[in-house]
Image: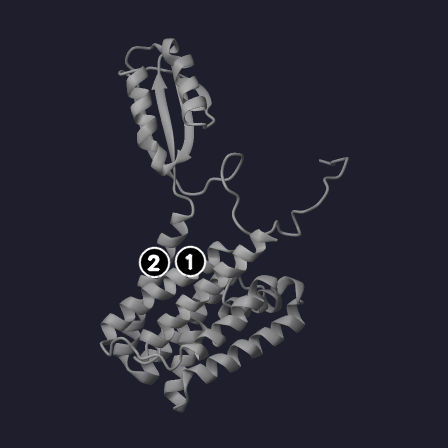
Amino acid sequence: MIRQLQRYMMIAAGTLVVALGFNWFLSPNHIASGGLSGASILLGGIFHTDPMIILWIGSLLILVVSAFSLGIRSLAASVIGSVLMPFFVLLTHSWQQLTDNPLLASIYGGVMTGVGLGIVFRAHGNTGGFTLLAQLLQKWMGIKPSQAIMAMDSIVVISAGILLAPEKALYALVSVFVTRKAMEMVLKLQRSSKMAYIITSFEYEQALSRAVLQDLDRGLTKLSGTGGYTDDHRVIMMVVLAADKAHKLKLLVQALDPHAFIVFTDADDVAGEGFNHELGQVPASLNRTPKSTVRL
């Protein structure tokens, strides 16, 4: 229950950040940087209508069509974002824009959109819109969601360049690029781990093992290897740990075996015992009891 509440709060917080980026930067400067929000800015500029109204109508219409076509159960992760996105846009609609410089707006709007989406995706949610349209296209036409979203975003950006001004498309591309980078940075914070390879000799094996298991409270996997120059047998220990513990591991290894060779590398996605599980539920397709017999 608490985990689900945390998930919903993260979706709400991320959606609020996206809405602020929309109202503070993108919408008042007419930067249609993809997604349903970008499409609403484009259509608002064409029909001289407030983009907020188009966003409301589009979000609810897509949600209703998706509910009939895909089923309510499959939309559990989308309903909250689909409702909260237009709600937060309406709530912050009267807040004053922070800049009328289109370049600054595209950069900071992209940052806020990327950060907000990153938070929402970390909670295994989405903001509806083009994500739901992509699911519909997959069901109706067999198009992959990633390809559908890329195609729809491209149509929005190109249309902005044709129907509004070529310069608007260039600013939109800047915003798309910044959004992607900001989102990747937020998602990477969730999995800030390091993997260390410790290459040592057999005489230090037990001492290093105890230090990792007891002092760092981490598990390890032992591999065997052979030195390329000396032909001596070596012990290779593989350890995955939080990034802020990497320096402590390095000091422990150097104190016990000054001649040990240690290599650190980023571990972008870690799951298993000893690491926090991501918020969310196991997909229904995987939540099955294994059959007693397997045919090959």
Q: List x then y, in percent, for residue 205.
A: 40, 14
Q: Is residue 242 left or right of residue 136?
A: left
Callout count: 2
SS label for mark 1: helix
Amino acid of disc 2? Ala
Q: Is residue 151 left or right of residue 7?
A: left
Q: According to the image, label 1 marks what residue?
A: 118
Q: According to the image, label 2 marks what residue?
A: 182
Classify 10 Å Cα crowding around label 1: few (below 14), some (14-19), many (20 and above). many
Q: List x then y, in percent, for residue 58.
A: 51, 79
Direction front: furthest residue: 2
User: Can the viewer see residue 7 in this picture?
Assistant: yes
SS label for mark 2: helix
Q: Is residue 60 above or below residue 113?
A: below
Q: List x then y, in percent, for residue 62.
A: 56, 75
| Image quarter (top left, top right, bottom left or bottom right) of the C terminus | top right
Amino acid of disc 1? Gly
Residue at 37% over, 82% down: 94
Q: List x then y, in percent, for residue 53.
A: 47, 84
Q: Is residue 258 left or right of residue 225?
A: left
Direction bottom: furthest residue: 48
